[in-house]
């Protein structure tokens, strides 16, 4: 079960890294008006937006990390490749990130670089770091 806990930790790391970025993007969209101008009025503080965004991202990323931890547990005996302890799992995470990010890259050209950087971060944390976290843990000893 070290893989599941490693997924939770990796998800929390992603929540910590993505919270300020998403909060600033939401605040920038608020300044431009439109839908976000009505959802986040001018009197709403940046700290409260950050707290709400972090709560939502914490639930999302740790939940995804737990599910990917179960996938990693099922793929435990796959061999390593290209610097990863589990090459098949890293390839799975990269393919999943590509499948989920490709429509966003096409539909949101203004945020293309930000979305691609987020996808790369997901592949690095979940696909590469998570098998190492599971290997380094001491749950089964």
Image (cartoon, helix red, strand yellow):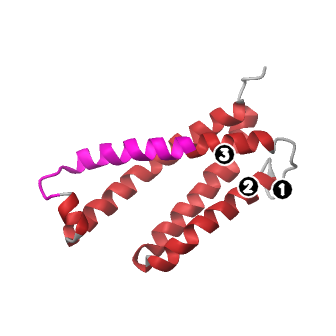
Indicate whether residue 52 is drawn in magenta.
Answer: yes
Q: Is 118 on the left-hand or right-hand side of 73?
A: left
Residue 34 sits in which quadrant? bottom left
Q: Residue at x 58, y 37 (%)?
A: 8
Circle 1 packing at 10 Å, graded few (<14), some (14-19), many (20+), is: few
Q: Nearer the viewer, residue 34 or 89?
A: 34
- Decide which of tag 1 and tag 2 comes sooner along the chain: 1
Question: Residue 90's mark?
Answer: 2
The Cα–Cα distance between marks 1 and 2, rounded to whole angstroms, is 9 Å
Q: Which is closer to the viewer, label 3 or label 2?
A: 3
Decide: is 111 above or below 126.
below
Residue 93 sits in which quadrant? bottom right
Circle 2 packing at 10 Å, graded few (<14), some (14-19), many (20+), is: many
Q: Which is closer to the viewer, label 3 or label 1?
A: 3
Give the magenta range.
41-63
How many numbered discs sit on the rendered protein? 3
Decide: is 106 above or below 78.
below
Of all residues shown, which one is farthest toward the top?
141
Indicate whether residue 77 is drawn in magenta.
Answer: no
- Decide which of tag 3 and tag 1 comes sooner along the chain: 3
| Residue at mark 1 | 81
Residue 46 location, x and y as percent?
A: 23, 51
Q: Is 132 on the left-hand or right-hand side of 16?
A: right
| Residue at mark 3 | 68
Tag 1, which secondary structure?
loop
């Amino acid at each position: 079960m070290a893989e599941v806990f490693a997924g939770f930790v990796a998800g929390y790391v992603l929540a910590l890294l993505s919270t300020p970025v998403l909060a600033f993007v939401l605040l920038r969209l608020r300044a431009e008006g439109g839908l976000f101008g009505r959802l986040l009025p001018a009197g709403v503080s940046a700290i409260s937006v950050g707290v709400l965004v972090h709560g939502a991202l914490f639930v999302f990323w740790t939940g995804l990390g737990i599910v990917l931890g179960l996938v990693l547990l099922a793929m435990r005996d796959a061999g390593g490749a290209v610097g990863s302890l589990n090459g098949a799992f890293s390839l799975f995470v990269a393919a999943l990130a590509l499948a989920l990010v490709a429509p966003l890259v096409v539909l949101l050209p203004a945020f293309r670089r930000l979305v691609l950087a987020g996808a790369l971060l997901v592949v690095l944390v979940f696909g590469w770091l998570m098998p190492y976290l599971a290997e380094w843990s001491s749950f089964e000893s």
